[in-house]
Structure formats: C-alpha cells, structure tokens
Image (spheres, grey):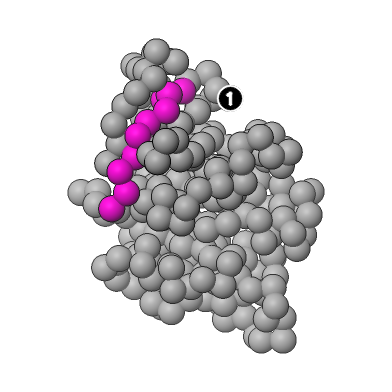
Amino acid sequence: MIAGQGRAETSEDGFSDELSRLKRHGASILVVGSVRPDHRRDTCRRLLGQGAEKARRRVLISTTSETNQLSKLAGDADSETLSMISYDAQARTTAASRSTPGSSISSSPTEVDALADLGLALSNAIDSFEHDANGLEPAELRVGVDSVLPLLEEYGRQRIFKFLHLTNGRTRDVCGMAHYHLPVEPTARIVPVLSPLFDVIVELREQHGEYQERWMLDDGAHSSGWLSVTTK
C-alpha cells in the first residue's frame, strides 16, 4: 500500500498521464536503492501486477541463485502464465535447458549459465506467451529481474548496456513492462550509466523507519515525490 506525500514536486495529472501512456505502449523500469529484501519484494510484486484484476503473464528472472524467492513472487500463478529463469554463472559445466516457442511453460526454472542464453530464454518465454494467448494485451506481460549486479560483475558495463537495450526492446515489442533491480544507492556511479536505457527510475529508501519510494519518468520531467510504502 502506498500513501502520497511530496506531490508538489510534479503535476499529478502529468505524472498519471505519462504513466498511463507507458503502460499502453510498454515500459522499462530500473529500481535502485540499497534497502531490505522485504521492501524490494513488495515493489517487485506490484510491478509484476500481482492482485490486478486483468490477467498477467510473468517472466521472473533470478541472477542471484535464489530461485526459491521466485516461487514466492510467483504466488499462485499457473504454468500457463508464468515462466521462471535462473542464471548461474558458476554452472557452466551444466547444460542449460531452454523453453521453446509454442511449448508449455514449466513451473521449474529454466537454467542458463551465459548471457546470450539468458536473452534467448527470455525471448523464447515471450514467444510462448504470444503463441498461447494469440497475442498479448498492453501491460499483460511483466518481466522482473531480481538483480543486475551479478551480470555487471561477470560481463562489465558495455555488454550489459547492450543486453538491457535488447531485452527492453523485446519486451516493448509486445507492449510489456520489464523491471530490473539494481541494489545500490542512487548516487552510485553505475546508475547514470544505465539510466538512459529506462523509461522509469524508481528509487527506494528507508526514512525514519519508514519505507519510501519515488518514481521518476521521462528523465525526471515527471516525479511522484516520495511515497510511503507499507509492505505486506
């Protein structure tokens, strides 16, 4: 649950209009902030559209080997509306299993150990959803990545910049919404490097024992101001 404050930072109508436009046409979201796991999980659930009346098809990607957390985020989603992908750079000797377009999506994670395979697994999951649904509605597809940090550490800024550009484009092709967690402070040097790739930057913080977040759209032209968040 979110309670508003700091609305003077923006025109509320302008912010809402721009957010609605992004939901119609697809959006990429970077979530930054070094906060507690329950705060990140709550933000992730909302960005995945949990609790929404409309049907959602979700791709959950873990780069942290915490696949059990994917199941918690998935909730009661069934295999027809959920695809889980686990990236593990340490598992190079293990053959990566891949989903294929038009096949049923397994409830167990697709395991990959290379960046190219991760991009392919995501694209295949989207292809499967498109095939099964005979086309996707705007904002029906939701993609969530639990951390970009392991990818940055393994492949460096340049390759991850290109990877994010491609995956954002693939998600936007079906008017979907993809969000990526970058668990560092907003002042970290990597944030302005990656920010141009994203339509929305969501900053998380804990202030006086209270969880808060701030949404910035269109390079900061529209801001929600700091919003109080109650985790579930």
Q: Is residue 107 above or below residue 7?
A: below
User: For residue 92, which quarter of the picture?
Assistant: bottom right
Q: Which residue is drawn at 38% across and 39% down?
A: 210
Location of residue 161 in the rendering, given as x and y in whole percent from the top left corner: 71, 47
Kind of residue sitting beneath label 1: Asp
Q: Residue at x 51, y 71 (%)?
A: 66
14 left or right of 27 in image: left
| Magenta-drawn stretch contains 38 | no
Q: Name the residue under label 1.
A: 219
Q: Is residue 132 visible?
A: no
| Magenta-drawn stretch contains 227 | yes
Q: Is residue 87 visible?
A: yes
Disc 1 crowd, CA 10 A, few/some/many (<14, 14-19, 20+) = few
Residues 189 and 176: in front is 189
Give SS at disc 1.
Answer: loop
Location of residue 49 in the rendering, given as x and y in whole percent from the top left corner: 33, 49
Which stretch appears magenta? 223-232
Q: Residue at x 39, y 77 (%)?
A: 107
Residues 159 and 39: in front is 39
- Main SS, magenta residues: loop
Location of residue 149 in the rendering, given as x and y in whole percent from the top left corner: 66, 56
Q: In this view, does 6 lie above or below 189?
A: above
